Image: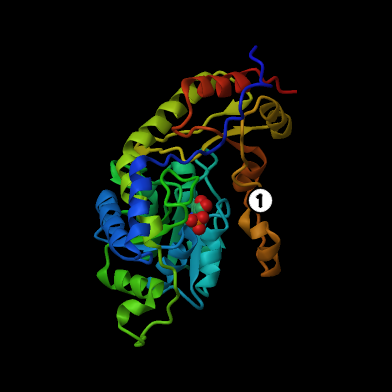
Amino acid sequence: MRSMRTAAKIPIAHPIIGDEERQRVLEVLASGILVADRMVREFEEAFAAYIGVPHAVATSSGTTALQVALEALGIGEGDRVVTTPFTFAATSHAILHAGARPVFADVDPGTANLDPEAIEAAVRREGAKALLAVHLYGLPCDMDAIGETVRRHGLLLIEDCAQAHGAAYRGQKAGSFGHASIFSFYPTKNMTTGEGGMVLTSDPAVARRARLLVDPRTEGEYVYSVIGYNFRMTDVAAAMGPPQLRRLDRLNEARRRNARALTAAFSRLPWLAPPVEPEGATHVYTAYTVRVRDREPFMAHLAREGIDHKVFYPMLIPHTPAYRRLGFDGAFPVAEALTREVLSLPVHPALTDDDLHRVIEAVTTFRPR
Ligand SMILES: Cc1ncc(COP(=O)(O)O)c(C=O)c1O
């Protein structure tokens, strides 16, 4: 067996920044125009065209994009929004920031995405104005079932695509199903602008409100009809967007190839469940997440072998101290089991063949108790 003492640790994420990004950032710095301008508009247009939605508004992060999307759709005081307890906290924080109340529904054990039956039950039990669906780890939700629930109850649909750039359901891109959708360009995502986000919508009125919330100055100097923020993306960040986007499909294909190699190597391990890709879904593997029963010794073994790994997510949002203080709780048996069993392994496109073999060797040589 190879000596791990000399081998560098294989990171869980590795942003790929090319010459074009560097050159365009330098161009912005040389121009002296650093705020949202030409680069932001170019990135918005390119990203909207890629997803297949007419309007895009760039933001400072995925977190601010979520807040803007909800407010631009008119979600606020007294409204209920069904969402998943098994996600990054920004998803449901945004609902609270908008003045609305999250209603958590359990997830599907196979996909870790919202369970359509649990959504239906939550809407019937508590009533809801909107559904905020997260395409977790790069895998789109079951959009057939979600579409039916949304139509049946007249819900607004917001897609959190922070982990789903280029993912698709029956050939249609994640981010083009909802009344609005959001993306994040944080460095661990499938494409990055350092920090950054985007709100997408087909509704011109929602797009206009979103733009005013992100940048109240767009209404005209010192004339305000909306209580806005400053959630703008800068031109320095946006300069990286178009070249990142041009590379996205190729890099997603590399993620999918890496995932196939991992899954093929792990398929006979009785103690590990690899991620699934249900019929109709195109997974883009922002995270390659397996389930293991006895996670602690497995993590210790990976650490010894120099394989970076991460638990997304170890605690359900409604069970965190901040949410408990607000009176949230509830039993979500499937999601709770996932918090104890999930583990994400390196799958990013910067992995070499040698790296991939090291990940495979490390996992397959582990002997569970
Ligand atoms: C599902 C989900 N929603 C929202 C966000 C927030 O994005 P950002 O980190 O850009 O604010 C993230 C990012 O980590 C995420 O994974």
Furthest toward the right, the residue is 369
Q: Examine the image and state in which quarter residue 39 appears.
A: bottom left
At which x and y percent is residue 293? 67, 32
Q: Which residue bears the numbered disc 1?
A: 315
Give the left or right position of residue 170, taking residue 82 as reference: left
Figure quadrant of the N terminus: top right
Q: Examine the image and state in which quarter residue 53 appears.
A: bottom left
Q: Is residue 195 above or below residue 232?
A: above
Mark 1 surroundings: few (<14), some (14-19) or many (≥20) residues within 10 A: some
Helix, strand or loop status at disc 1: loop
At which x and y percent is residue 98? 50, 73
At label 1, the amino acid type is Met
Q: Is ligand 1 closer than 8 angstroms to the Cβ of mark 1?
A: no
Figure quadrant of the C terminus: top right
Q: Is residue 301 visible?
A: yes
Camera-side residue: 83 or 333?
83
